[in-house]
Amino acid sequence: MSKNKKFDIAALFCDFLIIILEFFGLDMVVAEMGLPAFIYYTQLSNAFLLVATIIYGFYLLRRINGGKHKIPRKVELMKYAATICVALTFIVCVTLLSWMTGYGLKAILTRGAMLELHTLCPLLAVASFIFLEKYNIQRGREIWIGLAPTLLYAIVAIVLNILRVMVGPYPFLMVYAQPVYMSVLWCGLILACTYGIALILRAADRAMRKPKHKKH
């Protein structure tokens, strides 16, 4: 068995774990909150990862069985974007929401469905992306594709908050509870963090796939 096929099998196993955990976590949230749960970036990003992983896993399975099947570039970019989204979820939970919501770090990473949606699925997705999958993400348009879901969520959420259709659901989106400059600062910070994640994932992927030259 070739080294690439071993990596594909390991990646497929990781995808299977993600799918199981996502179904379990999202089912818990929907059972508790109903469909309004999907106003949260956490649920949307994890649902996005679930869909991307199912589609990516389908093509990965074809490649394992057939050997010559390629994973479409659109599917790879979807998985890349979804991985960025859940990585952002994890980072925001650790650095902001753990103290802004009063839950504390342990609770926000391990309580109920938070274990799957805030911790396990994001970490598995990032680990699989870096160590098992191969993307060769290009600078420019492909990186911005990775940022698009977060940017879209930010725009929609802020507009709905301004129109008083929705409150939050995160403290930094509550435009009427803070000065305008704070809303701008928070949005800029989170989008900059998203861009940083996109660059780091790209760099890590390239570093892991870079051929290692033997010393003579």
Image (spheres, rainbow, N blue to C red):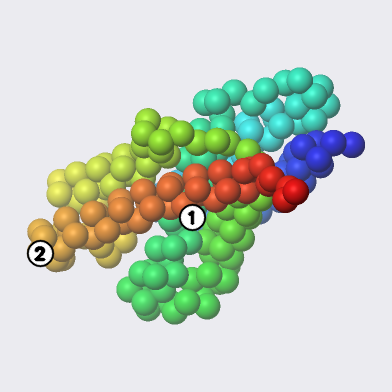
Query: Residue at point 36% right, 69% down?
Result: 96
How dense is the environment of label 2, judged by Cα within 10 Å: few (below 14), some, or many (20 and up)? few
Q: Would you say residue 144 is visible in this rendering?
A: yes
Residue 92 at what x, y percent from top left?
40, 63
Query: Residue at point 15% right, 49% down?
Result: 162
Quadrant the N terminus occupies: top right
Give the number of the mark in front: 1 or 2. 1
Residue 63 at what x, y percent from top left?
75, 27
Residue 92 located left or right of residue 58: left
Where disc 2 sits, the SS reads loop
Residue located beneath label 2 in the image? 179
Q: Which of 194 and 47 is in front in this view?
A: 194
Q: Name the kind of residue labelled 1 in the image.
A: Ala
Query: Residue at point 10% right, 64% down?
Result: 179
Q: Name the kind of residue labelled 2 in the image.
A: Pro
Residue 153 at what x, y percent from top left?
33, 44
Residue located beneath label 1 in the image? 87
Q: Nearer the viewer, residue 38 or 45?
A: 45
Residue 150 located left or right of residue 173: right
Q: Which of 9 and 29 is in front in this view?
A: 9
Q: Would you say residue 30 is visible in this rendering?
A: no
Residues at marks 1 and 2, CA–CA distance in whole angstroms: 28 Å
Write down the quadrant of residue 76 in the picture. top right
Which sits earlier in the primary sequence, circle 1 or circle 2?
1
Where disc 1 sits, the SS reads helix
